[in-house]
Image: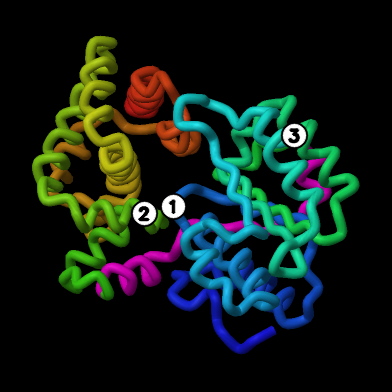
Amino acid sequence: MDDKDYFKGIIGQQKPLKVLRKALVTGAIHHAYLFSGPKGIGKKTIAYDFAQAIILNDDPLGEVYVRENIHPDLLIIERDEKKTLISIEQINREMEPWLSLKPYRSSRRVVIINEANLLSLPAANALLKTLEEPPGHAVIMLVADEQLLLETIISRCQLLRFFPLPEADLHGFLIQKKVDYERAAYLARLAQGCLTTAAKLAETEELEQMWRAAWEVISGLATGQEIEVFKSAEEIEKSPEIMTALLTSLLRDIFVYQKTNRKELLIMSEYDIGYEKMKHLDGKRVLASLARIDELRNRYKTSVRANLLSINISYHLMDALQ
């Protein structure tokens, strides 16, 4: 293996990177990997970098082909934007025949399946057959935001878990993006471990107006009136990723302030008086709602009914506020 660091510039995720670097150095590359963890924390980028390292180790002149996604030994499978799941045709008509061919320029053929948690059941079963008896030159990488895969698939992969990034890592990333030091610290905390959310927040000029809108949503939902759920959903749909981040941050703030009465622990301390006036929240309900909201917000890109996601999220917020 050459001395080039293909993971240069990756933020955090040192544990999975250590495993991948060791595999590259020793040449002991597994036939299948599962990159599992929340969205927006670098899984897809790292999988691509690992694929690039595997291929270019044998084909150093193929860098331009990898960069343009036209290398003959690299295949990337993604869900059709018009569909909610990865179809069996993408596995047994696209991947399997391609993977059965011998490598053209490298010693391995590498497949990356993005959003692998969205494999249809027939597609998952077809993939399982390949994982059970893979060609000797095959490396299959599954990238999944949720570990909603067949246990038999998971057991045949080397599992690499990815976790939300520490605030310090996000802060450093935002500083590199020329964000002011104090604002970077504030956005890093607000991003809740998600790199893509941190980047979007840094680019959002109307963040103050969105905070006000989020507080109005929370205040409305706290009344328990069902009409507020639909008002909330309408507001969320304007910018699902950022608005859900703001709303869940406010929910956490309310709970934390009611428990501690410490403004320095809050993300949005301006509303501390409002937090005091809210009904005293139940910790178990808050945590359950936050967990469910995190699951739902990951599905915006894959759902043809985004409005239903927004409504469900709003109901979970309302439930936590009662």
Provide the secondary structure element on which disc 1 rests: loop
Give the Cα distance between marks 3 and 2: 33 Å
Q: Which residue is identified by label 3?
A: 92
The span picked out in magenta is 151-175
Residue at image position (81%, 49%) is 100
Picture coordinates of residue 94, whole percent (x, y): 68, 38
Residue at image position (47%, 60%) is 68
Give the Cα distance between marks 1 and 2: 5 Å
**Could you tell me the amino acid type at mark 3?**
Asn
Between 174 and 267, the one nearer to me in the picture: 174
Picture coordinates of residue 277, whole percent (x, y): 19, 33
Dot 3 and dot 2 residues touching (CB under 8 Å): no
Q: How crowded is the residue under tag 2: few (<14 C-alpha within 10 Å), some, or many (20+)?
A: some
The disc label shown at residue 40, or none: 1
Sequence-wise, which precedes: disc 3 or disc 2? Answer: 3
Question: As drawn, which residue projects farthest toward the right?
Answer: 133
Dot 1 and dot 2 residues touching (CB under 8 Å): yes
Q: How crowded is the residue under tag 1: few (<14 C-alpha within 10 Å), some, or many (20+)?
A: some
The disc label shown at residue 196, or none: 2
The quarter of the picture where the N terminus appears is bottom right
**Could you tell me the amino acid type at mark 2?**
Thr
Residue 277 shown in magenta: no
